[in-house]
Image (cartoon, rainbow, N blue to C red):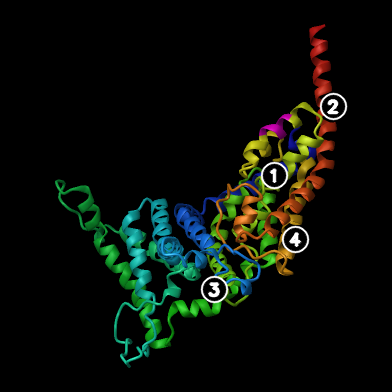
Amino acid sequence: MSSSKIFGKAFDSFVEKFAAIAGVIGRQRHLCAIRDGFVTIMPLMILGSLVTLINNIPLTNDPAKAAYPMLGGWLGQFDALKWIPALNGNVWWGTFGLLTIFAVLSIAYHLAKAYDGNPISAAITALSAYLCIVPQMSQNMLLEDGTDLGGLWGNLNWSYLNAGALFMAIIITLITVEIFVRLSRTQKLTVKMPDGVPPAISRSFAALIPTILTILIVAGAATLIKVYANVNVLDWFSATIMGSLTVASGTFGFGFIIVFLTHLFWLFGIHGANMFEGILQTFNATAIGNNMAIAQGGGGSALIFNKSFADAFIYMGGVGVGLGLVIALIIAGRSKQNRMTGRLGAAPGLFNINEPVLFGLPIVFNPIFIVPFLLAPVISLIIAYAATAIGFLPPVSYVIPWTTPPILSGLFATGFAWQGPVIQVINLALSVLIYVPFVKIADAVEAKREKASEARKEKEAA
């Protein structure tokens, strides 16, 4: 049944305009570059979280009863095994510990590529410009023997290289690439080499002047601010904007907006997850780094909502708590199409892929499933967020692949806390209960359609 027959032509006109606006947002270069940049470095993020998780697996719920309450500390007691926590620490440092550097390179590459520019030169230029802005350690840093390290270069402040500086680094990266691309398009600034010169050398010389000017512009602006305003631009941004945005990104309100809009877009056939991937990835690493520090005994307040939180406790089986819909179709579906859709969606649903159900049932443009498709994920958000806020569920502190099956994802994301799978089971059970009545309504509609189709075939055969 077409949407025109259900809602009228005015609705179709609204859908077309809505889809057009959403399409523009979904194709926005900067958001796409951030999304693709994080997808590129996702293996590093997952590996960094995995080795940290292994080193920090709790061996007891009561640290006072054990000298080494964490697996990494326990393994460190044995000479034959102490290389394991040492290796994990080194791998963490080379992945999650320097995540901002990798993000700058990756995002700059994808943004320059979107402009048909020189992605490699843009990536190197962006990293250089960012490092020009990163402040050195305190000028009054002294060793025990009184040696002043303030005059030495290279004492970079690590807080500007780890996940905590991501948002600031992304802004600098986007600005740098915009400058570089525009300068690269200026023919007067392009050094052209003879035809016989190898292409790699030609591209390098073509980017020579744009690279030099871009770094000087970005570093010069930051230096002027430092000299005349006596503030580092990264520190200013962190103190005035970044802190508020980061805290806001972990709140229930932010989570509700993201979850609701993601599913609203999907109802109109627009990939809602891709729409907000860039935004979520921007804050996710910072939130995970913050929560990871808390899980390891650090202070501070947890950022409850983040992308890994949503993947573990909301997008179980895909958007709409897809696995709950699949289970509802299998246990309550009576029509041939609904039962078949549930069975076909079961296997991919275990790995959080539910496009077969979204387009096979369908969910898209289906008025019957509007309410449960929006309600189930919101209820899951409320339960998981509340469970974390009251201290029952540990904050999500580890990056997990979005294809990790439910139960395992809840276990890994919370650092092997048994409460994770418990909350997932509760959310799945409630989502099934939400979907079942609407599956029965869809069955009734489908049964009438199947009956009419069979009657038509019998009439034609007669």
Question: Disc 4, disc 2: CB below 8 Å?
Answer: no
Q: Which numbered disc, 4 or 2, marks the residue that appears first in the sequence?
A: 4
As helix, strand or loop, the secondary structure at mark 4 comes to helix
Q: Report, in whole angstroms, how far the alpha carbon at label 2 lies from the one at label 3.
A: 56 Å
Tell me the amino acid under the disc marked 1: Gly
Q: What separation in Å lies between label 2 and label 1 (alpha carbons)? A: 26 Å
Q: Residue furthest top?
A: 462
Q: Which residue is mark 1?
A: 322
Mark before the other along the chain sequence, 4 or 3:
3
Q: Report x, y in % for residue 21.
A: 60, 51
Q: Pointer 2: what residue?
A: 448
Whether residue 303 is visible: yes
Left or right of 108 in this view: 21: right
Q: Are marks 2 and 3 in contact (CB under 8 Å)?
A: no
The CA distance from mark 4 to mark 3 is: 26 Å
Viewer-nearest residue: 51 or 345: 51
Sequence-first tag of 4 and 1: 1
In depth, the one of 46 and 216 nearer the eye is 46
At a point 37% along the width and 90% down the height, the residue shown is 140
